[in-house]
Image (spheres, coloured by chain):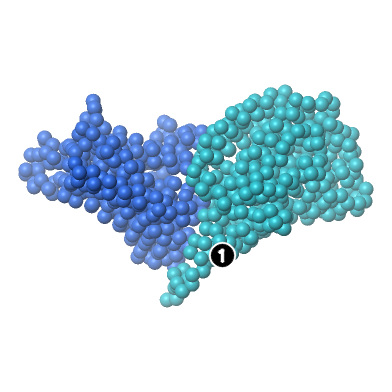
Chain colours: A blue, B cyan
Amino acid sequence: MNITQLPYIKDIFAFMGSDLMAAVIGLLIIAVFVPLNVAFLVLVERKVAGHIQLRPGPMEVGPHGILQTLIDAVKLLGKEMVTPGMTDKVLFFLAPILVVVPAFVGWVPISFSPIMQIREMNVGVLLIFSFSSISILSILMAGWSSNNKYSLIGAVRAVAQNVAYEIPLLLSTMSVIIMTNTFRMSEIVNAQSSVWHILYQPVAAIIFIIATTAECNRAPFDLVEAESELVSGFHTEYTGMRFSLFFLAEYTNMVIAASMATVLFLGGWFGPFFPGLIWFVIKVYFLIFVVMWVRWTYPRLRFDQLMNFAWKVLIPIALVNLLITAIVLKVI
Amino acid sequence: MNIKTIDDATVNQRVYQLNLGPQHPSTHGVMHLLVTLDGEVVIKIEPIIGYSHRGHEKMAENRIYEQFLPNPARMDYLSGMIFNHGYCMAVEKLCGIEVPRRAEYIRVITSELNRIASHFIGAMDYAMGLGAITPFLWGWDDREQILDLLEGIAGSRLTYSYGRFGGVRNDIDQAFYNGTRRFIDRLRGRFWDYENLINQNIIFIKRSKGVGVISKEDALTYGVTGPSLRGSGVKYDVRKNEPYSAYPEFNFEIPTREAGDCLARYQVRMAEIEQSLNIIEQALDHLPPGPVRSKVPRFVTPPEGECYLTFESARGAVGFYIVSDGSRIPYRIKVRAPSFSNLFAMTKICPGHFLADVIAIFGSIDVTVPEIDR
């Protein structure tokens, strides 16, 4: 099922050609939803951080500060975009543009509810992973072109970290894929109508959440930014809207990662009483809250510890988990 | 067009230099560390100091002893009360002024409160250097209570001028007495929270244990004092070894750790907070009655001569060396700043560590930059 089968839109689709229309409407929804969602998440992050740290968080703009991030966005829009001297101008310009592409495209194959999905694809899960790798390219571009040692260290760390953590990420995803025999998002969700995958695959679910946290460069794996060592990491030299595009991509990737975890392990839209979409949103935001909670509780890992954790702990466990899953499925 | 980018400059070199500071989020002020790196591994580290040099020692040569009273607190703004009392003690020693016992007790209480506040910043700022921001703000919250208490009696929140030659400026009031009692109870209840949030945090322990080990020999060679020395297993505290003020009358321990790493220094600081609470409690229990300031001339005129007085600030042993030529203006005041000696132990221990560890070590040694430069 997809968006083309909504009752009123169906007639329009019949008139215009359903695929094109679905793409246009879907992308419009994304284009409106993504920035607003990021504004909301930044506020949530600041409020969660505030309450964990025994302070109220932003309180000035609007009731309880709910308009703070909108005002911040306006401020960033009005700022001058400084390009420092001796940078690689082309790459410096392209990096923030390239970083938002996967953040928008990643929404396309996600099935939010039985009828809310922009486009069903045979390779939906793979598409998100392959696009998420592009964001690493843009981080490398940003760090390299900035002509700043802090940025360069941050970018090099980003590449090494993402190469290391994509392997356990894909391995833990494969454990689910070989159970469901499909890369289609909606079919993976439908396979969980009775029992969620997290009950069959608790280890894979934990590895998936850890690895996506690292993929999104969130604490305790935020070595790419590491403000106490690298000032701001790869986006040290970025100002104004270019900086906020990196910010936007970071938070959107977090939502995509949480959506993926919901689809793969938490039973997608299934749940009692409420309609599917509401359950999906509740699960996604719960996961995001957990990620924020971890960020404001734990210190940052050191770079060698981060690498050791991926190569010596996560990958072996994920491999063994995959092997056991394959054997059990074969026997059954 | 002649463009020289870092990739041109360092493409054929493994080794490169990184300027940590003078403006950097975790250098605690204007501190400049010139780090030579191979990849992310430190080869050499060179602290460059002097960005916040204000010439306090030179200022002392141009004003009378009373006029210099506000300056010591501005050397180490985190333990200003201790410096303020220390300077008063040095001048009293030079002039042979007696201090009433009640004043000595009040000095101990205010100094120890100040020490707790400073240790909270030291320990929690270390956690922030590791990337945990929440402990920092929790510590800030507890420190705020101390600042409020001290503001109530001394009038200022950070750079106190509460000490006077021959005592303190004013007696403590009932509000301060009750507030300090309440603060001690509150803080004892909070240790459990810190234990859960930081001390048992697996990433915190992994980042701290075995990092930046200062051996006992190195610590003594570099003249490291304070919690950093006690973290290396040397049981030296000026309050016990060369007692001054009313400290011999109190029963307290000197916490030490053998490891000498960042975790040991952090643990020593947290243990010292508990010991300071014990001292304050004993002082409040046995607070003697009487005046808080002895009869001292309006302007002191020390005899010709010199004196050296050492006392324990939150960062280590501070020394005030005063030379008097018999006039109302000091001939020379030399301050031995513990942060200076502690900082340069870094140059010995940092090579071989990662860049992230430099921040951790710098935070665990807990220096105040204005105190290094003076």
Q: Residues within 10 Å of mark 1 (few under 14, many from 20)?
A: some
Residue sitting farthest toward the left = A15
The spot of residue B89 in percent (x, y) is 82, 42
**Residue at left offset 25%, top offset 41%:** A263
Q: What residue is drawn where x is 70% and y is 31%? A: B278
State which quarter of the image contains the N terminus of chain B. bottom left
Q: Secondary structure at mark 1?
A: strand
Q: Residue furthest bottom?
A: B1
Residue B298: name its quadrant: top right
Query: Total marks drawn?
Result: 1
At 81% from the left edge and 26% from the top edge, which residue is drawn? B288
Q: Which residue is depicted at the point 52% across and 49% down? A: B207
What amino acid is at disc 1?
Answer: Ile
Q: Nearer the viewer, residue A237 or A300?
A: A300
Furthest residue to the front?
Answer: A331
Residue receiving disc 1: B43
Does A104 appear above or below B46? above
Q: Position of residue B40 (x, y in %)?
A: 49, 61
Picture quadrant where residue B332 is located = bottom right
Tell me if A146 is positioned left or right of A34 in this view.
right
Q: To which chain does the residue with label 1 belong?
A: B
Give coordinates of residue B333: x percent, y percent: 81, 52
- Left or right relative to A181: residue A93: right
In the picture, measured across the screen, residue B6 lies left or right of residue B178, that is: left
Front residue of B196/B130: it is B196
Query: Residue B339, can we see it?
Result: yes
Q: Is B61 positioned to the left or the right of B315 in the image?
A: right
Q: Is residue A109 visible?
A: no
Q: Nearer the viewer, residue A261 or A68?
A: A261
> Residue A86: horizontal and vertical position, in percent?
44, 68
